[in-house]
Image (tube, helix red, strand yellow):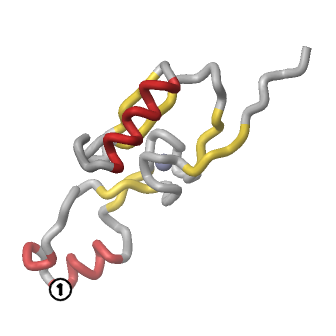
Amino acid sequence: MPREQSHWEICSVCKGEGTLDTLGVVNPHDFSDQEWEDYLDGRFRTQCGTCRGTGKVRSDASKPIVLAGSNGQPVVYDDAADASEHRLRMQEGEC
Ligand SMILES: [Zn+2]
């Protein structure tokens, strides 16, 4: 019996960046110039736990599907149909 094919996908939580913004939506006016430079440098970012900083995840039909929620938080789905519904809702901006 052939093995279940799995492949690499771009991590949907960090969009392949490997890091996550810890501050959410930011306002440059809340930062001093130095802090803002640090922010743009990525110093306030943290490693993405979903892909462990690699920016990619192994796609495997037997594994739960992890998608990014409205606040960038990981949302886990065991069912591919539920996950694609989530994607649709995200596209419509209702999630
Ligand atoms: Zn990630």
Q: Is residue 43 left or right of residue 54?
A: left
Image location of residue 80, percent across then percent down = 52, 26
Number of residues whose C-alpha sits closer than 10 Å to that of mark 1, classed few (under 14), some (14–19) or many (20 or more)? few
- Identify the image quadrant of residue 32: bottom left
**Extreme residue toward the left, this view:** 30
Q: Nearer the viewer, residue 31 or 16?
A: 16
Residue 42, image x, y percentages: 37, 69
Up-down relation of residue 67 to residue 32 (above or below) = above
| SS label for mark 1 | helix
Q: In the image as oriented, which residue stretches furthest toward the right? A: 1
* Picture coordinates of residue 83, whole percent (x, y): 45, 31
Q: Where residue 43 appears, x then y in whole percent?
A: 34, 67
Q: Which residue is mark 1?
A: 33
Residue sitting farthest toward the bottom: 33
State whether residue 75 is above or below residue 9: above
Left or right of 15 in this view: 94: left
Q: Residue at x 28, y 72 (%)?
A: 39
Amino acid identity at mark 1:
Asp
Front one among 31 and 85: 85
- What quarter of the picture does the C terminus occupy? top left
- Is the C-beta of the residue carrying label 1 under 8 Å from the nearest atom of ligand 1? no
The residue shown at (43%, 52%) is 14
Q: Residue at x 91, y 14 (%)?
A: 1
Q: Is residue 6 above or below residue 64?
A: below
> Does residue 20 lie above or below 52 as drawn?
below
